[in-house]
Image: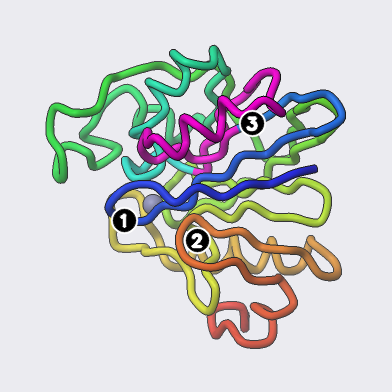
Amino acid sequence: MIIKRVVVGMIETNCYILLDETTGKAAVIDPGFMTQGLKDAVQSPDIKSVDYILLTHGHFDHIMGVYELKEITGAKVAIHSNDKKCLENERYSLASQVMPGKQKPLSCDVELKDGMTINVGSLEVKVIFTPGHTTGGCCFVVGDTIFAGDTIFAGSIGRCDLPGGDYMTLLASIQNVSKTMNGDYRVLPGHGEETTLECERKYNPYFRG
Ligand SMILES: [Zn+2]
């Protein structure tokens, strides 16, 4: 498994490219904006196909690059059913507040559900439903790595004050991740630097349930 991070857009969203080097199949997690760096990364010779665009949630800073990335790669777009309306309407992604008229609507191809698995070549991506930042937030687990979206940040958690956000729901989601994922994991958040689950259990005040 090879993971590449590309930081995109004005809110410095972490977009991750997950590559199964044995088959050349890849997935892109949260293409917040299409940048030259992201284009170059998905067109790298090691990548034979981008099979999925996996979205941790539907906020504009995680999805504005989806339309163009899908056009380039033909990847299937996967998001939780509670957040799929964000792809269809800029009002729900909040793009309407920040860059009105810029989001091209599209529909999702795969509705994510808690516990389901998506295969990227020989890699298994497990979906954990983690609402609270939005009503359709998900984390993705591959091997020893958690792609945490805006649910977990190093030393902090995502905002709960945006539409669909709920503090107690987010805390419950974090407890669920902390308790069900035994042992240590690499945590790759939607913004900022990576961390580990053990480190967050020890030092992140929102993990003390
Ligand atoms: Zn967000």
Cβ–Cβ below 8 Å for labels 3 and 1? no
Crowding at mark 2 (Cα within 10 Å: few <14, some 14-19, many 20+): some
Q: Position of residue 85 (x, y in %)?
A: 36, 28
Q: Is residue 160 above or below residue 59?
A: below
Mark 1 — residue?
Answer: 11
Cβ–Cβ below 8 Å for labels 2 and 3? no
> Which residue is at a point 74% across and 77% down the rendered structure image?
198
Q: Quadrant of the C terminus?
A: bottom right
Q: Mark 1 or mark 2, which is nearer the start of the sequence?
A: 1
Q: Amino acid at mark 3?
A: Ala
Quarter residue 21 falls in: top right
Give, as a single range, the part of the protein colored magenta. 28-56
Q: Position of residue 4 (x, y in %)?
A: 62, 47
Label 2 and label 1: CA atoms lie apart by 24 Å
Crowding at mark 1 (Cα within 10 Å: few <14, some 14-19, many 20+): few
Q: Position of residue 59 (x, y in %)?
A: 35, 43
Q: Nearer the viewer, residue 28 or 118?
A: 28
Residue depth check, mark 2 versus mark 1: number of the one nearer the observer: 1
Residue 154 is inside the magenta segment: no
Residue depth check, mark 2 versus mark 3: number of the one nearer the observer: 3
Residue 43 is inside the magenta segment: yes
Q: Amino acid at mark 1?
A: Ile
Cβ–Cβ below 8 Å for labels 2 and 1? no
Query: Image check: 69 left or right of 178?
Result: left
Mark 2 — residue?
Answer: 169
Q: Is residue 200 above or below residue 82?
A: below
Mark 3 — residue?
Answer: 27
Q: Quadrant of the N terminus?
A: top right
Please tell me whether mark 3 sits on a helix, a strand or a loop.
strand
* Beta carbon at label 3 within 8 Å of ligand 1: no
